[in-house]
Amino acid sequence: MHGILEDFHSVPAILFSLGGFSGNHFHDFSDLVIPLYTTSKHFDGEVQFLVTDNRPWWITKFKGILRKLSRYDIISLDREQKSHCYPSIIIGLKYHKELGIDQSKSQDQLSMKDFRQFLRSTYSLKRRNAITIGDDMGKKPRLLIITRRKSRTFTNMGKITRMAASLGYNVVTAEPNISTSLWSVAQTVNSCDVLIGIHGAGLTNMLFLPDNAILIQIVPLGSIDGLARGYFGEPAVEMNLRYLEYKIKTKESSLSSKYHLDHVIITDPLSVHKQGWDAVRSTYLDKQNVKLDVRRFRTALLKALELLHQLSMYT
């Protein structure tokens, strides 16, 4: 009778699952990457990661972060034939809150400031601070518009980019997706001073913005204001970013052409909320696009310029 193969390890281990909502960029960071950082950082690399529900593409996507947190190969336990013995093991990750860290609950008093510095180091990001305009009008702030393809898309991108350019922005667009290199995304976002996008997982990339940069979240119809602020507005402030919010009007939503203006979906979104999250997601997130009123939105972009100018007065 053959004995069970055993491996004895001299370092502790952390066991966690890659199931759940992994694959959604927001949940990748909020549910996995940030909790993994807070759980493992104090080991200074001397810890081994054990995963269940393994998704090899996820390991590939976040390999830079994983290698900075552990000097050892990741072990997938789902098909592992050996027994592994560790001096100690942590089962599960220490989750604090949406896209954030509660410093009072962190073993090493870690904060989102520390995590963003960790990201800068991991991805060799050069810019620590956003542009300061001052009196040098030749310096153009770089504006990144996060685009989407399947839902919550901007249907008048041309007008938006032309208007932004007329105000003095250097406009860049990007559509990060699961196949996009995270290194490439990090470099692009870090090169920008203002990030704009409709509420959605793509706004998670604000993690790579330089300090004092500005996030402008476009909030679609559907009474999801609280959700939008909780997912991105409040975390942005804790990341040392400035946050602006633009709530669209009914005429800016594609729902206004699908339903009569007195339809309950337009007039009473909370009644849809009572039907549960699936109804809200299907109605207001999966089936809504946005045609920005560029004249109205111009005010938000001017406010962002004002904030960048104010920054220069105190630096």
Image: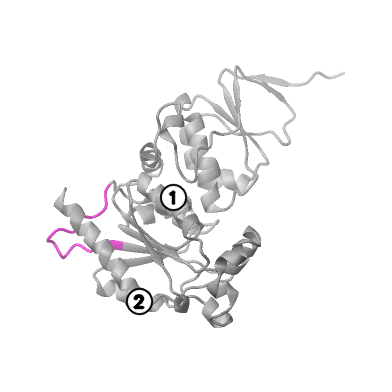
Say which amino acid is labelled 1: Trp
Disc 2: which residue: 294
The residue tagged with tag 1: helix, strand or loop?
helix
Q: Residue at x 46, y 30 (%)?
A: 105
Across and down, in percent, residue 258 comes to: 58, 81
Which residue matches tag 1? 183
Residue 23 visible in rendering: yes
- The residue carrying pointer 2 sits among few (fewer than 14), some (14 to 19) or many (20 or more) residues within 10 Å by Cα, namely some
Tag 2: amino acid? Val
Mark 2 and mark 1: Cα distance apart in space: 32 Å
Q: Is residue 139 magenta?
A: yes
Q: Position of residue 118 (x, y in %)?
A: 39, 38
141 shown above or below 58: below
Is 183 magenta? The answer is no
Q: Which region shows up in magenta?
A: 129-142
User: Residue 146 location in percent, x, y?
Assistant: 43, 63
| Residue at image point 41% right, 75% down | 292
Mark in the foreground, 2 or 1:
2
Query: In front here: 137 or 218?
Result: 218
Q: How is the image coloured?
A: one colour
Q: Is residue 44 visible?
A: no
Query: Total number of numbered labels?
Result: 2
Q: Is residue 88 above or below residue 130?
A: above
Residue drawn where x is 47% and y is 46% of the image: 99
Q: Which quadrant, please, contains the N terminus?
A: top right
Q: Between 69 and 153, which is closer to the camera in this rendering?
A: 153
Q: Would residue 43 be found to the left or right of residue 139 on screen?
A: right
Q: Are marks 2 and 1 in contact (CB under 8 Å)?
A: no
Q: Earlier in the sequence, mark 2 or mark 1?
A: 1
